[in-house]
């Protein structure tokens, strides 16, 4: 697929085509994702946990995020790339926020930045957008401020929280956010936020009634040594037979001559990512087992 754009994303959402988004943190994985029909890549601060080994996302620095994002851009030049602004890079002042967002664009080549928070962050979003940088908002469970939310928990199980989520998302839209990510909410709440907005929504653990789905790449590949999130699915079992067929078809060739390689984890990653994309298109993901109860 040709590299997508915000205009194409909005058009796809308006036409009812489900959108797909994965996290990624390094050149090799990004190279595999670049060979799929995936719409977008997020270099998330979740890399602090799955790559750097932190207990949560709070310790991640701008320098670490810039290094990871630049590596992903080199591996996936054809994908719409989003840099995740880490905690402390945008809350102190609008000037800091704009400067750090500008660093993402200039030093890594990303196409947009993402930041957490609703109405309280709306002026910050507006400042970054005014500098000519697209912003993606993030509501629901916001890991950088999970302590203030009472820990990692499902958001939107009472009317007050649901109303607050909708208000937060609308405030981000008014501030100029191009997209809004909704995390860890029951499906009906994902639907309410999506219905309230004019801009597309993505969900991670937000059910099927959003415009697109985000997954953590390490979850998609089954790389969760500590725990499996409720909304996660490992796609490796779904593609293993196809992988075996590829091995059989290439058995008469020297594996070292295959570019890109088709006999190992690169091909498994490519196949699993493409299956994720197709399952989102057909409505097979997320399944009921990945939904949070109402």
Image (tube, rainbow, N blue to C red):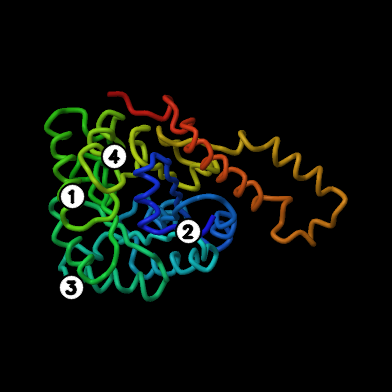
Q: Quadrant of the C terminus?
A: top left
Q: Residue at x 21, y 71 (%)?
A: 96
Camera-near label (4 vs 1) is: 1
Q: Which of the two discs, 3 and 2, labels the residue nearer the N terminus?
A: 2
Judging by the rendered image, the residue that carries numbered circle 2 is 25
Q: Secondary structure at mark 3?
A: helix
Q: Residue at x 28, y 59 (%)?
A: 135
Judging by the rendered image, the residue that carries numbered circle 1 is 118
Q: Secondary structure at mark 4?
A: loop
Judging by the rendered image, the residue that carries numbered circle 4 is 152
What distance separates the C-alpha of mark 3 from that of mark 1? 19 Å
Which x, y percent locates residue 27? 55, 63
Judging by the rendered image, the residue that carries numbered circle 3 is 95
Q: Which of the two discs, 3 and 1, labels the residue nearer the N terminus?
A: 3
Camera-near label (2 vs 1) is: 1
Q: Which of the two discs, 4 and 3, labels the residue nearer the N terminus?
A: 3
Q: Which of the two discs, 2 and 1, labels the residue nearer the N terminus?
A: 2
Q: Secondary structure at mark 2?
A: loop
């Amino acid at each position: 697929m040709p590299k997508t754009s915000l205009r194409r994303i909005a058009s796809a959402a308006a036409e009812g085509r489900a959108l797909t988004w994965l996290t990624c943190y390094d050149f090799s994985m990004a190279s595999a994702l670049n060979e799929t029909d995936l719409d977008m890549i997020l270099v998330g601060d979740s890399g602090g946990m799955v790559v750097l080994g932190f207990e949560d996302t709070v310790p991640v620095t701008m320098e670490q995020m810039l290094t990871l994002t630049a590596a992903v851009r080199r591996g996936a030049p054809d994908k719409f790339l989003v840099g995740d602004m880490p905690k402390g890079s945008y809350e102190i002042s609008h000037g800091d926020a704009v400067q750090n967002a500008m660093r993402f664009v200039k030093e890594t080549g990303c196409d947009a930045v993402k930041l957490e928070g609703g109405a309280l962050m709306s002026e910050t979003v507006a400042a970054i957008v005014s500098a000519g940088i697209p912003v993606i908002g993030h509501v629901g469970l916001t890991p950088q401020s999970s302590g203030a939310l009472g820990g990692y928990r499902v958001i939107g199980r009472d009317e007050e929280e649901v109303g607050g989520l909708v208000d937060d998302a609308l405030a981000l839209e008014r501030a100029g956010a191009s997209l809004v990510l909704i995390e860890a909410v029951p499906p009906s709440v994902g639907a309410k936020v999506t219905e309230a907005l004019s801009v597309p929504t993505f969900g991670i653990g937000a059910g099927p009634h959003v415009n697109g789905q985000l997954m953590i790449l390490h979850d998609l590949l089954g790389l969760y040594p500590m725990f499996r999130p409720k909304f996660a699915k490992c796609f490796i079992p779904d593609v293993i037979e196809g992988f075996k067929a590829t091995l059989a078809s290439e058995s008469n060739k020297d594996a070292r001559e295959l570019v890109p390689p088709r006999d190992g984890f690169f091909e498994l990653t490519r196949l699993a990512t493409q299956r994720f994309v197709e399952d989102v298109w057909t409505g097979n993901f997320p399944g009921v087992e990945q939904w949070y109860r109402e």
